[in-house]
Amino acid sequence: MRLDRPTGYLLLFYPISFSLVSYSQIHYSSLKFLVLFFIGSVAMRSAGCIINDILDIKIDQKVVRTKSRPLASSELSLASAYFLLAILLIIGLLVLINLNLPSIILSLIIIPLVVLYPLAKRYFLLPQIILAMTYNWGCIIGWATINSPYNFQIIFLLYLSLVIWTLVYDTVYAVQDEEDDKKMNLYSSAIFFGLRRKAILNILIMIQYSLLIIYGSRLNYDLIFYLVIILILFINLIDINLVWKNHPDNSGKYFRRNNYYGFFILLSIILGSQFNV
C-alpha cells in the first residue's frame, strides 16, 4: 500500500483539491468532499500499487530498487494481495456512492487506464503519459462533484497543466530505473527523452506553470496567486537544474519534493480564489 510513502497519495489528492477550492465560494460541502476524496485517494493509490505489484512481480524481482517489495520477495502471498485489494476497492466504492451521477460516471471512465498503466511500459514509448492522464483525472471529477459554475474549457486547462506536472516528476522518478528498464526492453519517458531530458523537462515545467497562470486569469484570481505561482516556477527550475542535475541518486528526493510544490499550488489557488474581486 506504500502508506509509509505519503507523496504518492498526496500527489493523487492534490489535483482533486485544486478543483474543489478553485471557486471562490468555499463552504461546508467543499470540506466534506475534501475529506471524502482524501480517503479515496489513499485507498485508490494503495489499490493501484497492489495492481502494479501483482502485474510486475517478475519485473520487480530483477530491479534492485523493487526486488524487496512484498510480492516480489515472496514475503506476501498473491491471495493476501487480492484480499487487501478487494477491501480497498470497497472503500473506494463507499466514497464513490457519496458523489453525484456525473462524478460517478467520470470515475468509472478512468478505471481502464488505472489497469493499463502497469502494462504500458511494456508496449508504449511514453508510459508516464498514461499515469499522468490517470493521476490527474480527479481534478475533473472534483469539478463535476461541486457542480462548478465555470465551464469545462477552464478546468481542462488545469488538467493539462497537471498532466505535464506528473510527466515531469515521474520522468525524473523513472531515471532511477533507466538502466534496468533498458536491460528488460521496457519503455519510459526518461529513456525516450534521452540526452535532451533536462532541456525537455525545463520546457515542460515552464508550460505547466504558464497553463496555471492562464487558468488563474480565466477565473480572475487575485495578484497573490500569480506571485506564488511564479515563485514556485523559479524554485522548481532551480531544483531541476541545480539540485537534481539529471542524477539517478537525486531522483527519489526530487519526486518527494513535489509534495511541497503541490501544497503551494493549492495554497496559491485558495488565496487567489478567496481574495479575487
Image: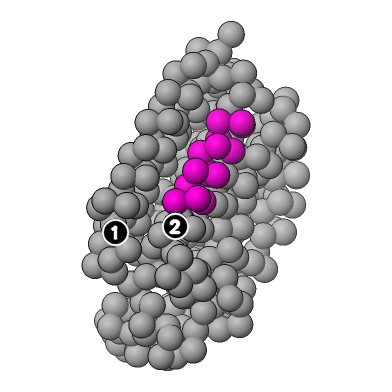
Q: Amino acid at mark 1?
A: Lys
Q: Is residue 159 left or right of residue 171?
A: right
Task: Classify 161 as above or below 256.
Answer: above
Query: Badge 1: how crowded within 10 Å, few (<14), some, or many (20+)?
Result: some
Q: Quadrant of the C terminus?
A: top right
- Residue 115 in view: yes
**Residue 208 counted in the magenta span:** yes
- In this rendered view, identify the residue nearer to me: 111 or 230: 230
Q: Secondary structure at mark 1?
A: loop
Residue under circle 1?
Answer: 245
Q: Quadrant of the N terminus?
A: bottom left
- In this rendered view, identify the residue nearer to me: 195 or 260: 195
Question: Hey, which quadrant is residue 273 in on the image?
Answer: top right
Task: Classify 103 as above or below 189.
Answer: above
2 vs 1, front mark: 2
- Marks 2 and 1 close (CB-CB < 8 Å): no
**Residue 220 counted in the magenta span:** no
What residue is drawn where x is 56% and y is 83%? 122
Q: Position of residue 214 (x, y in %)?
A: 61, 31
- Report the predominant secondary structure element of the magenta stretch: helix
Residue under circle 2?
Answer: 199
The tag earlier along the polypeptide, 2 or 1, is 2
Q: Secondary structure at mark 2?
A: helix
What residue is drawn where x is 47% and y is 23%? 225
What residue is drawn where x is 49% and y is 43%? 206
Q: How many tags in the picture?
A: 2
What residue is drawn where x is 67% and y is 60%? 110
Q: Is residue 275 left or right of residue 145?
A: left
Q: Which residue range is magenta in the image?
A: 202-215
- Residue 95 in view: no
